[in-house]
Image (tube, rainbow, N blue to C red):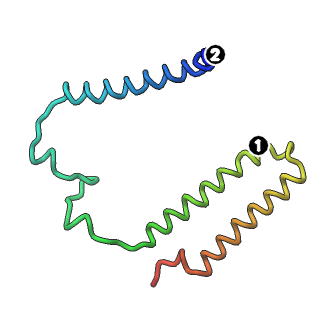
């Protein structure tokens, strides 16, 4: 029984060892074989050809974070709609009603965000 479990999971373990070994060899190889010229120009920050100005640690408006989180939230919820669309015929009326509830909950959340002013940029 124990040997059969080992035989089942051995390929996965072998694949994990090979993958980790490849990563380790690649990182160490590039570190040892790569050039080590550290000049002022090379170590200087570079952002799309624009000269860096001021401190990068200055706080900025929380609305950027809020919009990013809301985008991810609604984007992930839309991802749940793809399997439903693919299996629309197999799910029948029950699947359709469940998706109506799902979209309804999305809309309730979206209108709540609009009501709270989460998407307004003006203060």
Of the image marks 1 and 2, the number of the one nearer the N terminus:
2
Mark 1 to mark 2: distance in Å? 38 Å
Count of labels in the image: 2
The extreme bottom residue here reads 123
Question: Residue 80: image x %, image y %?
Answer: 68, 51
User: Residue 90 appears at what percent x and percent y?
Assistant: 86, 42
Which mark is nearer the camera, 1 or 2? 2
Question: Compared with residue 28, is residue 113 higher up or lower down, i.e. above or below?
Answer: below
Question: Going by the picture, which residue comes out furthest to the right?
Answer: 93
Q: In the picture, which quadrant includes the N terminus?
A: top right
Please state if 87 lies on the left or on the right of 37 as rendered: right
The image shows residue 97, relative to residue 39, as above or below, that is below
Return the residue at label 1. 86
Q: Residue at x 32, y 71 (%)?
A: 59
Residue 33: image quadrant is top left
User: Which residue is denoted by mark 2 in the rendering?
Assistant: 4
Q: Position of residue 10 (x, y in %)?
A: 54, 18
Which of the pair 63/49 is nearer the observer?
63
Query: Residue at coordinates 55% horizontally, 80% vertically from top-left?
Result: 117
Residues packed near mark 2 inside 10 Å, few (<14), some (14 to 19) or many (20 plus) = few
Mark 1, other Cα within 10 Å: few <14 / some 14–19 / many ≥20: few
Dividing the picture into quarters, in which one does residue 28 lie? top left
Q: Nearer the viewer, residue 39 or 76?
A: 76
* Residue at image point 60% right, 75% down: 113
- In depth, the one of 105 and 43 nearer the eye is 105
Residue 58 placed where, x, y %? 27, 70
| Contact check, label 1 and label 2, Cβ < 8 Å | no
């Amino acid at each position: 029984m124990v040997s059969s479990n080992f035989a089942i999971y051995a390929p996965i373990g072998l694949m994990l060892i090979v993958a980790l070994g490849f990563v380790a060899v690649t990182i160490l190889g590039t570190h040892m074989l790569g050039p080590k010229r550290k000049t002022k120009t090379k170590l200087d920050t570079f952002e799309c050809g624009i000269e860096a100005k001021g401190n990068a640690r200055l706080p900025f408006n929380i609305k950027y974070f809020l919009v990013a989180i809301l985008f991810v939230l609604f984007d992930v919820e839309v991802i749940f709609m793809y399997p439903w669309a693919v299996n629309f015929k197999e799910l029948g009326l029950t699947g359709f009603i469940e998706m109506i509830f799902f979209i309804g909950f999305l809309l309730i959340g979206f209108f709540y965000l609009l009501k709270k002013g989460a998407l307004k940029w003006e203060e």
